[in-house]
Amino acid sequence: MKKTRLTKFFIFGLLSHAIISFLPGTSSGLTIEEAVALALKNNPDLQRQQMNQALSEGDLIGKKSQNFGKIDLVASYGHYNLPRTLAPLTPASIFKDPTAVPTTEDLFTTGIMYELPLFTGFAQQRSVEIAALEKEMAGAAIKLSREQLIYNVKTLYVNILSLQAQEEAQREFHKALHSLYDDISLEVKLGKKARVEQLKAAADLENARVKTKQISGNIRIMKAGLASLLNIDIITTLEDFSVEMLDPGETGRNKEIQELERYRSAALDVEKKTRLVEKSNAAYYPQVTFNSFYGQNFGPNDSSNLNEGDWNNQEVWQAAVNLKWTVFDFGNRKTTRQMAAIRKQQSQREQLKTKLDLKKSLSEAITRIEMAIDEFHSAETELALTRETEIIEQTRFDKGATDLNDLLYAKARNQLALSRSITARYTYQNACFYLDYLLENGENK
């Protein structure tokens, strides 16, 4: 009877340590909310993604600024084998005093130039529209990156908690087997048990020890992965939280596929490709540009001038409107437009694929949750049955009514059921996190 009570005590302790890990407020450390906040603040991949958004915004500003043209300061120097006048002259000015016309073989020019596209076949307008779409796509990409990071952090966090709960249960199981081994060893010395039973107990004890070490090693590996996502040196302790199991009917999606950023990104890409097709049509239109120049031409008079060596300068300015219309380019425009149209079709197919993948993934996520709930209830039922079976087998073993194999098998079954129960609970939480990730609700929870 004493051994039976001792066994019950160990079983109670094993279950208590496993169950207590599910209760909130039982440990102090890094909470799951703090882990998510650290990741969103420190993760380098997310920071790089945010830089992409800044780049797209700068690109949009640059495209809009092209509508106002550009102003350039220009300067040049040229040496000629024949004298040049500082400015174009009319016959009348030459006839007035030909020897006084400033001429030079070293011509310097400085000035300011302004160029403005008046009509580009709507290419400039499409460029601005494309840049605006790329900015929206960059914003959607950041949203998706944040959701992906949150999901990865939460999944690792929960997996670590699951392993920690299993490790604690495994330690208690190891202690129970160790106590059983000590009892059997004592009875072997007293001649009440055979040596073979001690060997069987020792084998199971060693297996339980190795299993505990393996779980501990997996915890360290996952903590290193979580630390990498948070961009911190080390993860010490994690604070557990309560996992509430919902009824299967309470799980479902609260957003339509068209509302999700993944689908919206695909739709934006189709719109972008449409603008690129329209932009390629610009090559069939005339290009009209306004340009103007104001400056000075100057240089030393050459030997043909009465005032040889004297420096002269001449104000020059001009304003012009230029038109260029490509009428034949050997099929280059046609090829460019066909390639743009093909890319648009590819983008449309990608949009459809995104919709189908989302529909499939959402259905799969809801099914996973329902399966996890069913698995948990099944594991709880099995745990209760194997717990009772273990107590009965322990009593029968103490009375000599059964051998050690049946007792060890009962203990192993109970430990397996406990591990299954722990895993099912956290698997359910991970399934919920996956559904939140697909519905892009992770940041709001």
Image: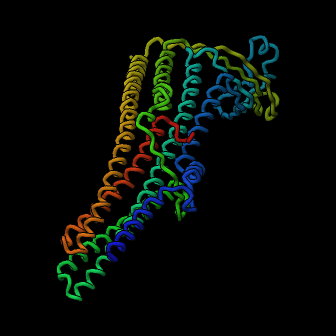
- Residue at (45%, 36%) from the top-left corner? 438
Can the viewer see residue 339 in this picture?
A: no
Where residue 204 sits, quadrant-wise, is bottom left
Q: Is residue 180 above or below residue 232?
A: below
As drawn, the residue found furthest toward the front would be: 1
- Residue at (37%, 24%) from the top-left corner? 349
- Depth order, front residue of 76/39: 39
- Residue at (32%, 67%) from the top-left corner? 211
- Depth order, front residue of 261/272: 261
Can the viewer see residue 102 in this picture?
A: yes
> Picture coordinates of residue 35 (x, y %)?
55, 53
If the image is split into quadrants, where does the C terminus sit?
top right
Q: Is residue 198 above or below residue 344?
A: below
> Picture coordinates of residue 44 (x, y %)?
54, 51
Colour convention of the picture: rainbow
Q: How many marks?
A: 0
> Picture coordinates of residue 406 (x, y %)?
20, 67
Where residue 403 sits, quadrant-wise, is bottom left
- Depth order, front residue of 198/32: 198
Q: Is residue 363 left or right of residue 151?
A: left
> Picture coordinates of residue 306 (x, y %)?
81, 28
- Residue at (44%, 63%) from the top-left corner? 16
If the image is split into quadrants, where does the N terminus sit?
bottom left
Q: Is residue 335 above or below residue 61?
A: above
- Depth order, front residue of 412/390: 390
